[in-house]
Image (cartoon, helix red, strand yellow):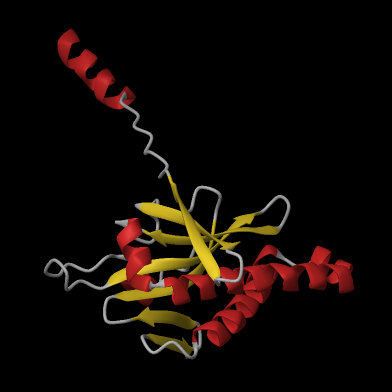
Amino acid sequence: MAEDVLHDLGDKVVSALVDATSATRADLAEYRDTFPNWVADSSDRGLSNWIHDRLWAHLRRGLTDIDSVELVDQGVTREVTVGLRYRARVKRHTVRDRIRSYATKSALAFWAQSEALEGLEEVRLGFGYRWDPEERVIGSTIVSLRDGLDKDAIWAVEVDAEASGGLGTEITWTPVDPSLPQIDLYEALARDEEDEAT
């Protein structure tokens, strides 16, 4: 499924996301070099907002001239629509590809995948980057799919650009294994043992 989604999004959209992430990474490095104390004093939330604004600015410039793309920037809602099928929000991903958002009606509705006829559903994606909270650095560019706000990713892919000798940018992607749920059967086993004892 991930490969189909990336194909449908197209190289221009994926390249714009990769380029925007790379430019934001450079912005953060420049910010650190110019104002190291400001970055050190920033709260996690404040730095996250600053990075989000930079990423959105670069993404907006990179996607403006692509016919199939529509950008929505209304207050706290920033979305990228690609064609009639894909809608994405720009999000920071943890190393396990989790995202965080306030549980507003809008966010809950967005991250729950739609129930529609096969092929007619709107697919909602996470566009963004992997964040290392210890080092406070921007990692790989990520495209992810999940079904629910507080759910693990169904799939996530790292997308990167490789130079291809004057032929433009070649996009490569690497699937990321989803983290498996942890199942604790202790309570069920304890109940079975109690039932057997009586």
The residue closer to the viewer here, 56 or 94, is: 56
Q: How many marks?
A: 0
Residue found at x 43% / y 66%: 126
Residue found at x 80% / y 73%: 31
Q: Is residue 8 visible?
A: yes
Across and down, in percent, residue 127 comes to 47, 68
The residue closer to the viewer here, 171 or 150, is: 171
Across and down, in percent, residue 29 comes to 78, 67
Left or right: where does residue 157 sit relative to residue 115? right
Residue found at x 33% / y 64%: 5
Question: Which quarter of the rendered picture does the C terminus lie within?
Answer: top left
- Furthest toward the left, the residue is 117
The residue closer to the viewer here, 134 or 137, is: 137
The residue closer to the viewer here, 45 or 62, is: 62
Q: Is residue 147 visible?
A: no
Question: Which quarter of the rendered picture does the N terminus lie within?
Answer: bottom left
- Furthest toward the top, the residue is 197
Left or right: where does residue 72 sit relative to residue 109? right
Q: In which quarter of the image is residue 85?
A: bottom left
Across and down, in percent, residue 22 comes to 65, 68
Across and down, in percent, residue 28 comes to 74, 69
Q: In which quarter of the image is residue 8?
A: bottom left
Residue found at x 45% / y 75%: 13
